[in-house]
Amino acid sequence: MSLTDVSADTTPFFSDDNEGEGPTGNGVGSPPPEEEESASGVSDRRAKVTVVVLCYINLLNYMDRFTVAGVLPDIEKFFSMSDGKSGLLQTVFICSYMILAPVFGYLGDRYNRKYIMCVGIFFWSLVTLASSFIGKENFWALLLTRGLVGVGEASYSTIAPTIIADLFVKEMRTNMLSIFYFAIPVGSGLGYIVGSKVNEVASDWHWALRVTPGLGLLAVILLFLVVQEPKRGAIEARPEHTLHRTSWMTDIKALCRNPSFFLSTLGFTTVAFVTGSLALWAPAFLFRAGVFTGEKQPCFKAPCDNSDSVIFGIITVVSGILGVAGGVQASKKLRTRTPRADPLVCAAGLLLAAPFLYLSIMFAQASTVATYIFIFLGETFLSMNWAVVADILLYVVIPTRRSTAEAFQIVLSHLLGDAISPYLIGVVSDSIKKSDSYMWDFRSLQMSLLLCSFVAVVGGAFFLATALFIEKDRHLAENYVPSDDAPIIVPKRGRSTKVSVSSVLI
């Protein structure tokens, strides 16, 4: 079998778990299978267990990503950082994640996805553990290790949704994706909660970074033993072996000519911008608001008061669960009325989130309770996008381009979204600050965070534009017919010239 044999049950990079091997016979001594395998080559029971494992790893990814945000006041105190440097911690990680996503997208469309994820997660766990031993004179080392963490996360986030897409179709796929994306807000919230609590108990923020590596090694073991590589697209009406695999550049050109994919990616970019800003800065902003109003004491000695991180983490978990579930259910009900339901739900989520985010920022100096309520409502509406955007990508892109599409979406959404937003908010805050006082620490960050509401409105507009093209692009993906108009060589004035078959066979 050649390395590019697309009709094989699995692509190479070792062979996987006896995939594609059915019963050799029904004679004596050949017990009947306990459960019939689907067209994907994976039994229904194992497919569901696979989703559980993938959800656990996704939760762990986001838990690790936001542990740093949960102990940010302590890290700022430890390294004596400005707001710009604080934002750089998240930006470096996202940039690494973004740059490596296309590499893993390319590999994920061509080689064994399970083993790629195992290697990436193992590397991510080791690097995270290494980052917990950095001293105060080596801030550059913390930046470096946070950047390398992006290797593991890129290897997983790019590929995992495509495995779910190859295990389920239609409403079952939407349900499984919603479960998968529940892990984003839950993991993010746990990052704040676990990070701040471990820091409080150990009186050292370094210990907060030592929780996820062990859990990451467990994830590798589960991934290796439980997950089975499904056949790409076999469960759908258009299985992979009926589609011609095209070059990476051809895939990219096709994706750029797909308005539903491109516009929804721009819409999702605004979601990434807003969530990236809030994820890093919301706990620090709430702490500064408390110091400004006199409700909290300034942080002179570690550990700092991280109670806001715990509360924000709980809000993130609950609002995320409600938002993801609400988005999926709203999409299901609206689909009975219009095929444009998905982008309309995403647009509504962003347009409703914008005013509540604005109110949460402006009320921080007047009422802590009101601020928490508005943050909760804003995050709930914002979270309506996660599973629905993923579903849009999977049904407007053909199976052989999905990992590449995931990578493209990750690159663009992070490049213009949360790769720049934490650092941008920090830089704007530093530029607005007129003096080194508690009042200006709060006011400058407050004014810079107002940018999130404006970006959310722009995102709603992108999803409304997506609704104009979604029917046509879904139809084209479902009825995609690869061109057989292959070039042949025809002599022309003593030279070989490539012309299409159709131009000769008139």
Image: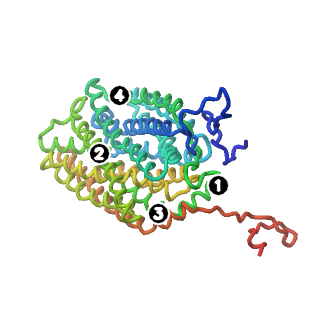
Q: Earlier in the sequence, mark 3 or mark 2?
A: 3
- List the single residue furthest toward the top: 202
Secondary structure found at label 1: helix
Q: Which circle marks residue 242 in the picture?
A: 1
| Disc 1 to disc 4, C-alpha distance | 52 Å
Q: Earlier in the sequence, mark 2 or mark 1?
A: 1
Q: Position of residue 96 (x, y in %)?
A: 48, 44
Q: Is residue 27 left or right of residue 471?
A: right
| Disc 3 to disc 2, C-alpha distance | 32 Å
Q: Earlier in the sequence, mark 1 or mark 4?
A: 4
The residue to which callout 4 is attached is 206
Query: Residue at horizontal 23%, vertical 35%?
Result: 306
Q: Earlier in the sequence, mark 1 or mark 3?
A: 1
Q: Amino acid at mark 2?
A: Trp
Q: Which circle marks residue 260 in the picture?
A: 3
The residue to which callout 2 is attached is 281
Q: Quadrant of the C terminus?
A: bottom right
